[in-house]
Image (tube, helix red, strand yellow):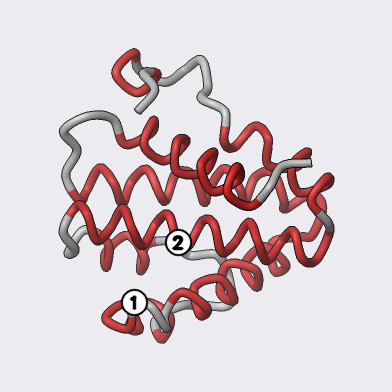
């Protein structure tokens, strides 16, 4: 069983791998959206589309206390997992702000899911999300 710091490190490493070197806010936003889409694909067969959307909304809500300038994201969300609002907000941030928010959001989502279904099942369900895929470009395969 991994510790929260190991999970956070794995999530950040995955995010950085997808972002690649010399990325701007748009690339960071796309990487975050891509991870959330992969999470959606992994969890929808288990908890359904509405379940994934509810986990996402709750995670986003929990993150707003440390990132209140992104509150418009939460207000503009639908009941479904529509990531276009989040992406539009993230591209307006600096690269560092978008990256920090993405890390906090993904770690919060992971922790919330772990609380609900346990660490072992969360790890099994999301293992493929955090591992780099063979279809990624060589620049993205380099470790941070």
Dividing the image into 4 quarters, which one contains the C terminus? top left
Q: Earlier in the sequence, mark 2 or mark 1?
A: 1
Q: Quadrant of residue 34?
A: top left
Numbered tag placed on residue 104 in the rendering: 2
Q: Residue at x 78, y 38 (%)?
A: 124
- Picture coordinates of residue 42 (x, y %)? 69, 44
- Picture coordinates of residue 140 (x, y %)? 35, 23
- Picture coordinates of residue 136 (x, y %)? 42, 20
Crowding at dot 2, Cα within 10 Å, few <14 / some 14-19 / many 20+, comes out as many
128 up-or-down from 6: above or below: above
60 up-or-down from 102: above or below: below
136 left or right of 52 in image: left
Q: Are marks 2 and 1 in contact (CB under 8 Å)?
A: yes
108 up-or-down from 37: above or below: below
SS label for mark 1: loop
The residue beneath circle 1 is 67
- Picture coordinates of residue 53 (x, y %)? 62, 68
SS label for mark 2: helix
Q: Residue at x 51, y 15 (%)?
A: 134
37 left or right of 49 in image: left
89 left or right of 32 in image: left
Dividing the image into 4 quarters, which one contains the N terminus? top right
């Amino acid at each position: 069983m991994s510790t929260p710091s190991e999970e956070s490190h794995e999530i950040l490493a995955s995010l950085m791998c997808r972002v690649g070197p010399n990325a701007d806010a748009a690339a960071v936003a796309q990487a975050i959206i891509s991870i959330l889409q992969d999470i959606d694909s992994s969890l929808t067969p288990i908890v359904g589309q509405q379940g994934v959307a509810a986990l996402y909304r709750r995670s986003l809500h929990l993150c707003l206390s440390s990132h209140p300038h992104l509150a418009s994201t939460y207000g503009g969300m639908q009941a479904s997992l529509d990531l276009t609002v989040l992406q539009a907000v993230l591209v307006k941030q600096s690269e560092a702000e978008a990256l920090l928010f993405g890390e906090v959001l993904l770690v919060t989502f992971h922790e919330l899911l772990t609380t609900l279904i346990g660490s072992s099942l969360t790890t099994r369900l999301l293992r493929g999300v955090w591992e780099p895929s063979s279809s990624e470009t060589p620049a993205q395969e380099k470790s941070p």
